[in-house]
Image: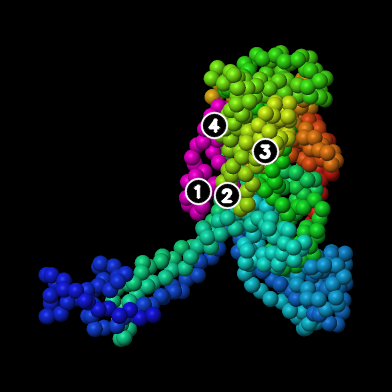
Amino acid sequence: MRLFVTCKALVLGMVLNGLCACSSPGTPASAPVQDTAVQYTRRRVVLTDIPQRGRILDRHDSVLVDTRPQFLLSLPRRPPLDTAALGQLLGWGPIATKKRIAAALPYEEAPAGYPVHLLLTKTEAERVRRHRTEWPALTLTERRGRAYTTRVGAPVLGYMNANAQAFLKQAMRYRRGRFYRLRSGGVETYYNGLLNGHRGFLHPLVDSAGQEHGTWAADTAFQQGQDLHLTIDVKLQAYAESLLGGRKGYLVALDPRTGEILCAVSGPTYSAGTLTAPDQAGNRAKLLQHEDMPLINRPAMLANPPGSVFKLVNAAVALQMGAIEPNASFRCDQSLISCVHHHPQAKSLTMGLQYSCNPYFYQVMRALINRVPDSLRTDTVAARHANLDAWRRYARSFGLDSLLTVDVPRESPGFLPTAAYYDKARRTPRWNYRSIYSLSVGQGEINLTGLQMANMVAIVANRGWYYTPHFVRSVGDNGPLPRFTQKHRTLIDSANFEALIPGMLAVMRRGGTAETSSLADVGIAVAGKTGTVENDEGDDHATFVGFAPANDPQIAVAVYIENGGFGATAAAPCAAMVMEKYLRGSIAPRRKRWEARIQRRSRPHDD
């Protein structure tokens, strides 16, 4: 593209030798004066340095993802290969060899001669090189690619789109792209530009003799790819995955003081690198076809009814709106709603939480919704609408019913119903509390993600504030993205959060719904809340939220196990052991048998 520079106006005070000089459009003011009769060419010069993609490290600087040499072995299409001899060459057993070849095929019963590529270690590649003359049909290729040093944290680490093209094509073909629409590239995709860096470019204006005369655009400085230092503790992540493993659900743990996510498990789990490795086409096909949908990043993308753990939010809002006092007493009236716990009458909010009494919280929410202020005393319909919308406004200040803006792609906002929603759903604005009472126990139309559940209990731990949960604590030598350092406050007074703590402590003590998950024997006071979500299509779902130590919260955990049954027996033990592992580094002997039993039930989908 040529730039023709002409001067068509008389510039006062700038006449030199009878000619007028002017700068070409887009040229900086500091550029030399140009002769108007000369033609200049815009050039874009690419600097030779190529940035290397940054690494991904955990919170203790263990490298999780890096760009390293990779060795790809291509097997001959014909004649049939002696797999036993190949296994001996590579140091694999006969069963392992067959499994590796099967995993590389995109579908079972692939036709003879279908191309098979195996990813080798450096040692295995050296063996192939040493015996090259004996195996002339084998082709060994060396290249650089993204290497995963860990098997855990697959949805968190994610993938580069360029490396995952084979998987994305498989996903697009499967059931009309069902999983392609739900793809989630983790931090590799979210921070792609920062990880990649960029090359340097110069933009000179050049005359016909090749001489430079200023620039036509700002030069671009070379930028090396930045390392990502995650908030994830890879050892805690591995431990949490061993507890959830092949079961559907999630476990999210974060530091409530900073919003840093310590581990985030989406179950069923699968190995990091499966979606990008060239020899994992068969395993990818199994993941796409599995009925439990392991490829969905459950903590971020699936929103579910939270169950009784949401009683914490309802209680805080009711206290804030003046609907109840901490010493409010309600009878366990099962004509209102069933209660599966046998317990004394809940004479206070603390006891209501300790026993997770459904009739108690039915009446708490009824007092909130049916509360009639003086200004609306003659219009109870308007009062119910106003109270429900006020409840929603307070609940939304927890980061619910909206995107938390966590640093992973495709986050779900969840849902909290409005009065207008019920007007439409019930086909009348004259609905009453009885038609929406399921909100009192965290069911009905309420939906929360796992990240929102963990953040919700972190807010209680902090008595009313939070930092947005995030996976990256520093980019290069800088800190996290600026939005993750901004403190957010709810609309609930800290005193009303403080009123919840005695009840949450009582949940973990004798007589509480989660007494068997107490960590009092190792000196850790846990504040928690169990939940059981009714499910019409199978076993109920088990939930739990909690934090520890109660007087100095350092970890907040949310667990959701689909079809797990009771929160007290399925979800609470997992949360307690993750807390203990993080705070103490080991599990006490009295819980070892429990730990082993849970781990035996959990098994990843690809080995």
The residue range painted magenta reads: 463-492
Question: CA–CA distance between discs 3 and 2?
Answer: 35 Å
Q: Amino acid at mark 2?
A: Asp
Is 444 drawn above or below residue 207 in the view shown?
above
Q: Residue at x 30, y 86 (%)?
A: 209
Q: Are marks 4 and 3 in contact (CB under 8 Å)?
A: no
In front of the other: label 1 or label 4?
Answer: 4
Q: Which residue is mark 3?
A: 424
Q: Quadrant of residue 557?
A: top right
Looking at the rendered structure, which numbered label has been put on residue 407? Answer: 2
Q: In the picture, which quadrant includes the N terminus?
A: bottom left
Q: Amino acid at mark 3?
A: Lys
Closer to the chain start, of discs 3 and 2, is: 2
* Secondary element at tag 1: loop
Q: Amino acid at mark 1?
A: Leu
Question: CA–CA distance between discs 1 and 3?
Answer: 41 Å
Closer to the chain start, of discs 4 and 3, is: 3
Note whether residue 26 is visible: yes
Q: In the picture, which quadrant includes the C terminus?
A: bottom right
Q: Which residue is mark 4?
A: 490
Q: Amino acid at mark 4?
A: Thr
Note whether residue 598 is visible: no
Q: Residue at x 78, y 73 (%)?
A: 116
Q: Percent from the top left, x then y, of residue 22?
A: 22, 74
Q: Which residue is mark 1?
A: 481
Closer to the chain start, of discs 1 and 3, is: 3
Characterize the local packing of mark 1: few (<14), some (14-19) or many (20 or more) Cα atoms within 10 angstroms: some
Please name whichever residue, 417 or 231, is drawn nearer the observer in this view of the structure. 417
